[in-house]
Image (cartoon, grey):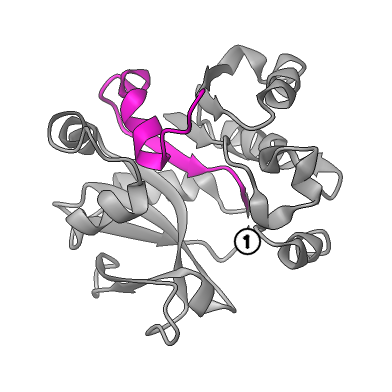
Amino acid sequence: MKALLLAAGFGTRLRPLTNTIPKCLVPIKGKPLLQIWLERLSNAGIGPFLINTHYLAEQVNAFVETSDYRPQISLVHEKDLLGTAGTLIANLEFFQGEDGLLIHADNYCMADMAAFVNAHNNRPDGCIMTMMTFRTDTPSTCGIVELDNRGVVIGFHEKVANPPGNLANGAVYILSGELFKLLSNELHNASDFSTEVLHRFLGRIYTYETKETFMDIGTLTAYEKAQYI
């Protein structure tokens, strides 16, 4: 199963750390974040990989050139950022109509990726994608989801003061070939995946909750915490 890793962002909340290094390459316990993703995905039998670049792209290029996973990686540079959905739609041919992963590669994720794929393969009828979720201690800073008794999303609450629960969207998805067709035909002008795509499919998004470490390392406080978990 192929994977698109979104790695082009500026990481503004991690400044000054990201003044000189892209967020996707910040080290966690001495290892670049992108390296962690590639290792864990490869160990689960996932690949090849497509990685988009923009901010400090030359550093990502250099990392890939010396990576053990270089034969499995393709890079696509965005002179102007396309947005999370825009990047996906611009590169739909990479998936060749088959199910594949869309990953925000700036999260620190220790989830069992093989179990995630298995959950997607056994999703309820009618579900067009599978979303990874995790429990958060700061629900007001996350996108919180509501589920029915099948584990299917029936509500979104994006960074609201008092969300109904603490089950958060991890922004790691397995998308079906059916969804890729819809993106190509009906949603080809979408830019942001969260605001322009997800909400259209309430009742059709299955979820997999990881019990392992999952962190948005978007702030310096969170980044420092990740070094000791």
Question: To which quarter of the image does residue 161 belong?
Answer: bottom left
Which residue corresponds to the image point at 66% horizontal and 20% vertical from the top-left?
Answer: 69
What amino acid is found at the position of numbered circle 1 in the picture?
Met
State the residue position of label 1.
215
Which residue corresponds to the image point at 72% horizontal and 14% vertical from the top-left?
Answer: 65
The span picked out in magenta is 79-107
Question: To which quarter of the image does residue 105 belong?
Answer: top right
Residue 149 lies left or right of residue 172; in this view the side is: left
Query: Is residue 47 among what the camera can see?
Result: yes
Which residue corresponds to the image point at 38% horizontal and 54% vertical from the top-left?
Answer: 131
- Of residues 219 and 51, the one nearer the viewer is 219
Can residue 102 be found in the magenta stretch? yes
Measuring from the top left, give residue 140's x and y in whole percent: 50, 78
As drawn, 223 above or below 32: below
Q: Mark 1 packing: few (<14 Cα in 10 Å), some, or many (20+)?
A: some
Quadrant for the C terminus in the image: bottom right
> Secondary structure under badge 1?
strand
